[in-house]
Amino acid sequence: MPGFLKKFYPDVYASTQKLNTNSNYCKYNNQSLQLFTSLLYLAALVATFFASYTTKRLGRKKTMLIAGVFFIVGTVLNAAFHDLALVIIGRILLGCGIGFGNQVVPLFLSEIAPTRIRGGLNILFQLNATIGILLATLVNYGAAKIKGGWGWRLSLGLAGVPALMLTLGSLIVVDTPNSLIQRGKLDEGRSVLKKIRGTENIETEFAEIVEASRVAEEIKHPFRNLLKRKNRPPLIIAIAMQIFQQFTGINAIFFYAPILFASMGFGNNASLYAAVITGAVNVLATIVSVFLVDKVGRRMLLLEAGIQMFLSQIVVAIVLALKVKDHSNNLSYGLSILVVVMVCTFVSAFAWSWGPIGWLIPSETFPLEARSAGQSVTVCVNMLCCFVIGQVFLLMLCSLKYAIFLFFSAWVLVMSLFVLFLIPETKNVPIEEMTERVWKKHWFWKRYMDDHYEGDGVK
């Protein structure tokens, strides 16, 4: 928003007002502005390790409450203050909220969900994130029209609404049976399990959780335990999926969708319209994933989406290469529509695959003794990649120009091959049976499950 740029980043504001002095691809390239965006993810990266401790020791419920408090305080600092330093501190606190929230919510959902709908229920996490993105874009669109240049305060301040909802929600929900049992509250864990399953017949599942908890309790150094041979398959897949999820280019598109479309010559209002359209597509496609993930499986959605994302990025790259130069823009109305359609095709594919499933598979494949630490590493790698993409995207757009889409499409090709050969299907497998039913039967990962390796120095 011009008001925000004028107040805190006058150099960028001046650059956007100059005509024909900057490349179409470079007018927003500013490292300090990118740092404001990406600082959020650097803070989240650090916070997730503290969240791992609270998730295990205090439980899932209290960790969600901590996340909500971070969000509320960060929102107040962002919206109310005139000093850039305090706004940046607020941004860091919001990042801590993200670190704690992303650590605990997928775990909470995976543990509380019945096996048959675990995938769909877990994807509600991603669905609500996509709804948040769409609502934020609509708020920005409205706030940008406020006279006097203070709309950015409203835009940042309204983050307090979902922050309050998260805080109040964390006070209402029960903790997961897995968490309660792991902390020695067996009777309460049994009672909660009966409540959330709606039946008295829970003894088999209760016994599985108690046994998993007993094994988990023997682990004194959870992060060192993660490196054990038997935990490498879920660890490698969790790390790879977070890297791949960000290097699809999705956050680059959503961070900077208005800027991206403005750089293509859409004009400020038109670029926000385009960002709203892509946000709506994101929500609708994620709803598709909720219904399909437990029917067709995780692998099928990831593989189909790989083809769709690869082709759409190639088309966008070709159109930009031919029509959008540094100081000229020959993008016709028809081709502009084609670019938006291709970006929407890309977003829809991501939204029913890598978006939700990138969080789902890591949250359901670690054994209980490694689950909290594994989720920490998952969130940490994701936030590190978000930080890197957030910090360098505008520089890459300026340097690579249209080829930035070729860069991301190459990553999509690599990740699709990874899925084809190395990611197993986990639909309809109970969360505490992954080792026996998934890892020990996979053509490649089963070699890491041989117990005799643990005693011969290969850990």
Image (cartoon, helix red, strand yellow):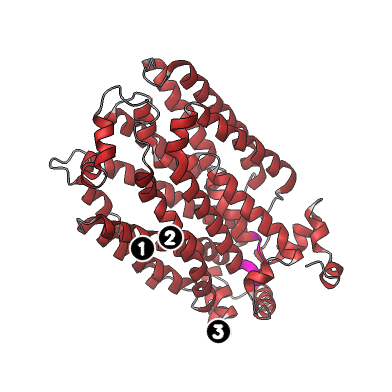
Type of residue at label 1? Leu
- The image quarter containing residue 226 is bottom right
Residue 12 among those drawn in magenta: no
Q: Residue 233 bears which disc, if any?
A: none
The span picked out in magenta is 365-371
- The location of residue 18, given as percent across then percent down, is 25, 27
Looking at marks 2 and 3 on the same chain, the residue that comes earlier in the sequence is marked by: 2
- Which residue is nearer to you in this view: 222 or 311? 222
Q: Is residue 371 above or below residue 239?
A: below
- The image quarter containing residue 377 is bottom right
Disc 1/disc 2 C-alpha distance (Å): 7 Å
Considering the image in quadrants, where does the N terminus appear?
top left
Query: Dot 3 corresponds to which residue?
Result: 185
Side (left or right) of 291 relative to 451: left
- Which residue is nearer to you in this view: 414 or 274? 414
- The location of residue 291, given as percent across then percent down, is 54, 46
Residue drawn at x 43%, y 31% is 398
Marks 1 and 2 in Cβ contact (< 8 Å): yes
Residue 164 seen in the current view: no
Q: Residues within 10 Å of mark 3 (few under 14, many from 20)?
A: few
- The image quarter containing residue 361 is bottom right
Query: Dot 2 corresponds to which residue?
Result: 43
Would you say the magenta stretch is mainly helix, strand or loop? Answer: helix
Side (left or right) of 371 relative to 325: right
Q: Residues within 10 Å of mark 2 (few under 14, many from 20)?
A: many
Marks 1 and 3 in Cβ contact (< 8 Å): no
Type of residue at label 3? Lys
- The location of residue 43, given as percent across then percent down, is 43, 60
SS under mark 3: loop
Looking at marks 1 and 3 on the same chain, the residue that comes earlier in the sequence is marked by: 1
Query: Dot 1 corresponds to which residue?
Result: 93
SS under mark 2: helix
